[in-house]
Amino acid sequence: MTKINEVKAMVEAGKAKLVPGLVQEALDAGSSANDILQAMVDSMKVIGDKFSAGEIFVPEMLMAAKSMNRGVDVLKPLLVGDSSSSHGTCIIGTVAGDLHDIGKNLVAMMIESAGFTVVDLGVDVSTDRWVEAIKQHENVTIVACSGLLTTTMPAMREAVQTIKGSGLTGVKVIVGGAPVTQDYANEIGADGFAPDAGSAAVKAVELSKQ
Ligand code: B1M
């Protein structure tokens, strides 16, 4: 088995202690940070499918997530660029009722490396908290709302509509996460949508210049 496949297998098996070492070994064996990241993202898809099929349960999903997070920690210095430009502050979080943060963390990492100061509100961010954070921080140009559950899409709608209706100017809202589409973003009045972390950073830069 190649090192990268070992990483994938150990993320799926939830072996959080083994994953960082294997990620380092995969890098040493010549795999790129992006390829290793993609392998771990693929693992989470496998985990999701097994969960849907009733083959695994929440604790296994949690261990796989922990393993992936440990692996991402090793990759982070290699994935984050050294941007000298400044596009202002980006407030990011996962919407109310939703505890998924791996995708949100990747988006935060990419947005930071694109030249934003990132304020991460974490998960389960209430509607009021988004607005408070925009008021608390200077030069907020982007708010990035992540959501992974279809059941919390109404919370995303409420967050976006409250931010847009708050009268705070100069702030653009982008949304994303597995169940979110461009159509849904349009419907709830978001300024932008991105399907993945890389394109979220591109979209954030584009919107911050408008
Ligand atoms: Co949950 N979970 N989970 N889970 N979980 C999903 C999302 C699910 C699809 C699994 C399944 O059933 N197949 C399903 C949702 C179904 C649905 O709503 N349609 C689900 C469910 C049902 C649940 C619970 C309800 C299970 C239960 O308790 N019965 C529960 C809910 C808890 C809650 O949030 N209130 C739950 C809990 C959990 C854990 C806590 C155990 C754990 C999360 C741990 C953590 O995040 N720290 C977990 C996990 C790990 C998953 C899966 C397996 C993996 C998610 C992940 O990290 N993917 C997931 C299955 C799957 O995704 N196929 C599943 C990797 C990550 C890189 O991808 O987050 O999609 P993703 O991010 C992508 C893009 O979406 C995008 O960029 C990233 C990649 O570049 N993106 C953005 C994300 N945010 C963005 C924001 C942007 C732009 C792009 O702009 C702002």
Image: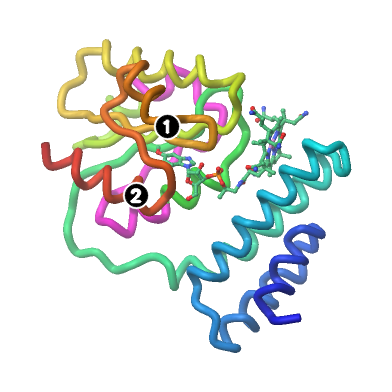
Q: Give the CA separation, mark 1 to mark 2.
A: 14 Å
Residue 170 is situated, as x and y percent measured from the top left of the image, at: 16, 28
Q: Which of marks 1 and 2 is nearer the N terminus?
A: 1
Q: Residues within 10 Å of mark 2 (few under 14, many from 20)?
A: some
The quadrant holding residue 136 is top left
Q: Is residue 124 above or below residue 119?
A: above
Q: Is mark 1 within 8 Å of ligand 1?
A: yes
Region in magenta: 109-131
Q: Mark 1 points at which residue?
A: 145
Report the quarter where the N terminus lies.
Answer: bottom right
Picture quadrant of ligand 1:
top right
Name the disc covering residue 92, or none. Answer: none
- Residue 207 placement (x, y as % from top left): 20, 38
Q: Residue at x 82, y 47 (%)?
A: 60
Ligand 1 within 8 Å of the CB at mark 2: yes
SS for dot 1: strand
